[in-house]
Image (cartoon, grey):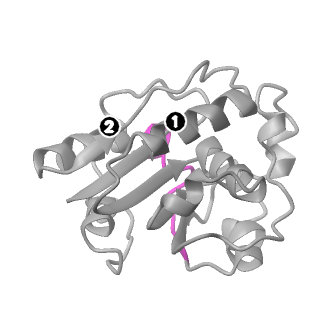
Amino acid sequence: MTAYLILHGWQNHRPENHWQHWLADRLTDLGHHVAYPQLPDPDDPDLDVWLTELARHLGELPATGERAVLAHSASALLWLHAVDRGLPGPAGADRVLLVAPPSASVLAQHPQVAAFAPPALEFALPGPTRLVAGDDDPYCPEGARETFGEPLGIPTDILPGAAHLDLDAGYGPWPAVLDWCLDPDAAITPRR
């Protein structure tokens, strides 16, 4: 059994038709342990509060079996901050999928999330990490591969026309992300 921690982004109140909610339901139906918490104050998040919540939820995952983290948008940056600060929780993840992290230039325009701007990417990630993003993500106009994938040295899947991989981009059911959960070598493709 794999334990999954699914982390949402800014302004996400876990709507039932979002791919993360869909994924949590599918994985639960398959018998996996799934944590998909509502993080505090998603409209005006506090980085330190979210870091505390991240540590708590990682600590509550079963100690046996594989542990996988899927982090979308601001939570992808939350993960990077946790690693940069040397917090112990990330070292316990067996694999991570970072989905559509926003760039510093965009976050600077939004005081509610400006503190989430990525740290200097001068650290090694503690375990296998993969990045997936749209080639036209308005939250990362510089390009996710150039901004995050190359500096971190991680495999990056750039999906054509996927924007921010959110509901506005049509990302409700997303079978490819379920495939990755069940097989980390699976191709991550756009929704069908």
Q: Residue furthest front?
A: 63
Q: Which residue is mark 2?
A: 21
Tell me if label 2 and label 1 are in contact, CB under 8 Å.
Answer: no
Q: Is residue 31 left or right of residue 63?
A: left
Q: Is residue 9 left or right of residue 1?
A: right
In which quadrant of the rendered view does residue 18 lie? Answer: top left
Examine the structure image and report whether residue 95 is included in the region drawn in magenta: no
Q: Which residue is mark 1?
A: 56
Other-residue count near label 2 (Cα within 10 Å), few / some / many at <14 / 14–19 / ≥20: some
Residue under the image location 84 percent in, 71 percent down: 122
- Looking at the picture, does residue 13 appear above or below residue 132? above
Residue bounds of the magenta highlight: 156-169
Q: Quadrant of the C terminus?
A: bottom left
Name the residue type under label 2. His
Nearer to the camera, 90 or 50: 90
Helix, strand or loop for disc 1: helix
Residue 90, percent across and down? 58, 57
Residue under the image location 83 percent in, 35 percent down: 114
Name the residue type under label 1. Arg
Examine the structure image and report whether residue 162 is included in the region drawn in magenta: yes
